[in-house]
Amino acid sequence: MRDVAIIATAQTRHVRADTIHSEVELIQPVIAEVIERSGVDRHDFDFTCSGSSDYLAGQPFSFVMTLDAVGAWPPISESHVEMDGAWALYEAWVKIQTGHADTALVYSYGKSSPGDLPRVLSRMMDPYYEAPLWPTSIDVAALQARAAIDAGLTSEQAMADIAYRSRTSAANNPFAQLTSSADPATLLGEDYIADPLRKHDCAPITDGGVAIVLAADDKARALHDRPAWIRGIDHRADGHHLNMRDLSVSPSAAIAAQKAGVANGPIEIAELHANFTHQEAILRAALGLGDDVEVNPSGGPLAANPMMAAGLLRIVEVANRIHSGDVSRGVAHATGGHALQHNLVAVLEGEG
Amino acid sequence: MFYSAALHPGWTGGDDQGGHMPDEATTIGEQDVLRAPLTLEYPFRRTTGPVIGAFFTGLREGRFIGIEDERGRVLCPPVEYDPLTGGPLTKLVAVGSEGEIVNWTWNTNVREGQPFDRPFAWAMVKLDGADTPILHAVDAPREAIATGLRVRARFAAERIGSLADIECFEPVG
Amino acid sequence: MAERVAVVGVGQTKYTAVRGDVSLPGLLREATFRALEDAQMTLADIDAIVVGKAPDFFEGIMVPEYSLVEALGAVGKPIFRVHTAGSVSGSTAIVASGLIESGVHERVLTVGWEMQSCSEAMWALSVSMPFQQQLVAGAGGYFAPYIRKYMDRSKAPDDTGVLVALKDRQNALLNPYAHLHEHDISYESVKESLMLWDPIRYSETCPSSDGAIALVLTNEAGGDAAKAEGRQPAWVHGTSFRSEPGWAAGRDEVSPQAGKDCAADVFRQAGITNPREQIDVVEMYVPFSWYEPMWLENLGFAEVGTGWQLTHDGATARDGDLPVNPSGGVLSTNPIGASGMIRFGEAALQVRGMAGDRQIDGAKTALGHAYGGAAQFFAMWVVGSEKP
Amino acid sequence: MSEPAPIDLPAGLWSQPELDTSAVAELADVESVQSLRAAATLYYDYTPGIATTLFLRALKEKRLTGEVCAESGKVYIPPRGVSPTSGLVTTELVELAHVGTMVGYCIVNLDFTGNAQEIPYVSALILLDGADIPIYGLVREIPYDEVRVGMRLEPVWVEDSELTTSFENIKWWKPTGEPDTSLSDIADYI
């Protein structure tokens, strides 16, 4: 395998509702910024890949409109995934491994605010047996949370602690949407929105986007004095149907973590794409993260949750800390589908 | 006519501190940007094939149908494939209309299209004779909802072969 | 890195307007199991699954691959979803090929599908957005002005499109999977069919189809093993995709630069310097008949302004020197999210010598071609009977 | 369209498996469910963005505005805020003439769901004077078989009292009566 590194990142400030910009207006500055930071001329990217979903803003072929922000002229080698941008990064990583590319531009974005996101996400469910009932993403997460609590993996107290920790950590994140929290005792005094979930257990609805530049081998070394090397990356799926899965565990995340080599060295930080507090507990177990691992120092998805970008954002947050020298080895996780159905794990390392 | 980057600060390029979202635009503010409702409405038709079709035929007749998987477990609702290996499943079996709640939540934020227009319980109900539960709504007060509660299907009076043929589940006795 | 890739399995469903007898998972499984049967494999042998389809709105299921994970035997495996408009399942096959070429996986299943009967795709393509005026009537309405431009530029005879439609629909009669089997089609029936989007006649447009196609791709060892057992693989000699803005000043919509660049790239990889001589069969994405001569020029098979001559001379017929769409093409079968991969899969069948009655004798090298969006996204591969 | 004649697939192919229904014999004599109807309605709060807003607000004042790509100098209408060829934000707006040349068209004979036009109608690509990319418009007030590339067109607006922030402010385009633009002058567009 070739050595591939993240050499530049950029993101929007994440907000509850960006009612000012179209999708292309939202993502254009992020792409422009990451290109500038990378030091790569925009005509010199060997590959471009993006991730988005038409359902979020109700815009068919959303990615076709946002391609304008890349300035795809002369024509470029480009592809798109209807998944979180973390998988666009994965496709770019594979492309570099084939030898057809040495550099790649990756971006993703989501405007969730135009629709009723939890209801929109019900369209992901099985079209015969589940979607006709319109169960929301929160309803489904609540069933998973109860399974996790019943399995002894977490508790409402532990979940409130996670919410508190995440949002107070985000106070140091200038891009985060939610940057403070009441204390756990106060949080536990609130009503349920979907028993056993309270509002604080759920990621916010967010508009935003992120971008990354990848480079291989010596090119990465030339472009950054401390590239964030992708030492391992893998993704796996679990079954979809709620009734045929044990919702309290994530076997697919465990396989991805093993394939990515999470346990091959000490992990300093983990950015986990846990959209609900209980999912952090499920993922900690699946990835084999000890109590010493700092999880979501950025605040994580509970502080900013731009759909289709929140997974790639986890990779950005780990890469930024490696770039700055604060961290030498970290793990980033991204998820897709509901109830942690699809999981990607990447291990990033600084040089040395 | 010209407008410049100054009209929407931060939009045209990066600044390391605040990201790109303008807090306020000097000439065109948030209140000035157009918005409009957009409704997407689709009348989908889904073919069922024989296995899913058997389940909905059963519902129309007021009964539940499951299928045996490769390990002999009964899946209800039935699918055409083994949930672990993807191998084909072919053995349809009858399943009871009563069962027990194995997982649930209380939905306080009711949405259009859901079984009730007031707060209600979603439950995973494992029917007698089945090894996997079915997702539906339960008509019972919140304090009655619990894992282990025995419930039975309340079928709609007019049934056409649809999930709505099950009005909901309700406590037994 | 740079592992050789072989196509060892191709599975297709019978394409039709409404596959009323199967569920969506059933449709995909039909193609999948046929591809596995062809490859002499089971789901357990597959390392990863790559799927592609057109916009999720068409079937009303957001990220539908997730509810299909169990049906595709993907539990515990990587599943990947590509979406690049009409070129999507061509792009999908390329992504699948890349997983092997890179050395990441050894055996990959890739599936493209569409159940157009779920909804009216025409409607989905013409969503009425606020503040806009509904002027473009579906894809035909978008492409018709550019077809007219081609006609004006090339001075091609008016019946060029008729000839293409007639040829493809007659080719389809030899393809048991094709959607349209119009036994009584004639030059006159095409020419007299209703002018929908002038200059596009009804019989010069693609149908709306239900269907799925699956391919099994392996690394070199897998291709060698298949060959040793007497099952000819199709070797991938080159893959490429290219994109450009669909709406840009100075863009040539009739012969987009991205198509030219994509063809040049894939031919370079495959060592092809004279495509007319070196390519034996082309499976080309022709949803409206006039796109055959337009793409012949765009891809470099004919000089600018002369693509129509190949059609009129019969060069693109089954018995011509450059058969185009012996499968019947998109004009005979169009499950949108599968149409690109069908081109790629039919190209593979030809060089494997497994195309049945539609086989072109002696086909050694074939091009699979797909495009999408406003003729702005292109995906192509070249496959051959010999190792690259 | 005639139904496709039945045709046999190659023998021995994997097909949908036969079901064992012996344990559910009660379903044997009833009609099977073959399909489901599933309506889905989703509601969104659509935001066209800054560039489109500026354009539509001008349109409400019967002005046609384009944007300039800072790299190529090309003038785009309607503006989208970003040049598709450079990826750069378009910071300069220009006002365009209310007259243009038809550079492409299609006569639509097809009715379809959601269509608001009487058929047949002419959907045209119109290059406004000063613009580098054509816009779509409906052409009327001329028999559709006399429509031709190079024709000069001008917009027919709704009554001033009916002006809104919508493309529908222009009801259709009609011939100006001027001589056609020479095709060589619009060679890049045809």
Image (cartoon, grey):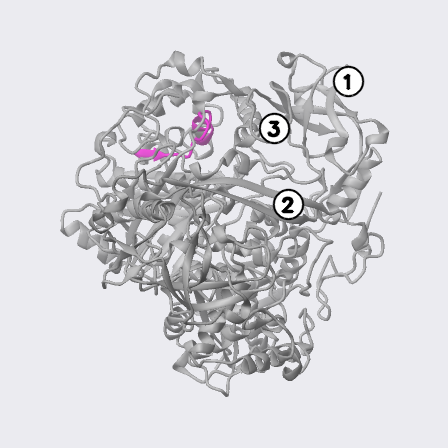
- Disc 3 and disc 2 on one polypeptide chain: yes
Q: Chain of mark 1?
A: D
Position of D9 with respect to A194 (left or right) is left
Q: Would you say the residues marked 2 and 1 are in contact, meaning their CB atoms lie under 8 Å apart?
A: no
Q: Earlier in the sequence, mark 1 or mark 3?
A: 3
Q: Is residue B140 visible?
A: yes
Q: Secondary structure at mark 1?
A: loop
Q: Would you say the residues marked 3 and 2 are in contact, meaning their CB atoms lie under 8 Å apart?
A: no
Is C321 situated above or below B48?
A: above
Q: Nearer the viewer, mark 2 or mark 1?
A: 1
Which residue lies under the disc numbered 1?
D176
Q: CA distance from mark 2 to mark 1?
A: 31 Å
Name, please, the residue furthest toward the bottom: A292
Q: Nearer the viewer, residue C28 or A189?
A: A189
Q: Is residue D132 magenta?
A: no
Q: Is residue C288 magenta?
A: yes
- Disc 1 and disc 3 on one polypeptide chain: yes
Q: Earlier in the sequence, mark 2 or mark 1?
A: 2
Specify start and end residues of the magenta stretch as a single range. Answer: C280-295
Q: Secondary structure at mark 2?
A: loop
Which residue lies under the disc numbered 2?
D84
- Disc 2 and disc 1 on one polypeptide chain: yes
Q: CA distance from mark 1 to mark 3?
A: 27 Å
Q: Is residue A109 visible?
A: no
Q: Earlier in the sequence, mark 3 or mark 2?
A: 2
Q: CA distance from mark 3 to mark 2?
A: 29 Å
Which numbered marker is on residue D115? Answer: 3
- Figure label count: 3
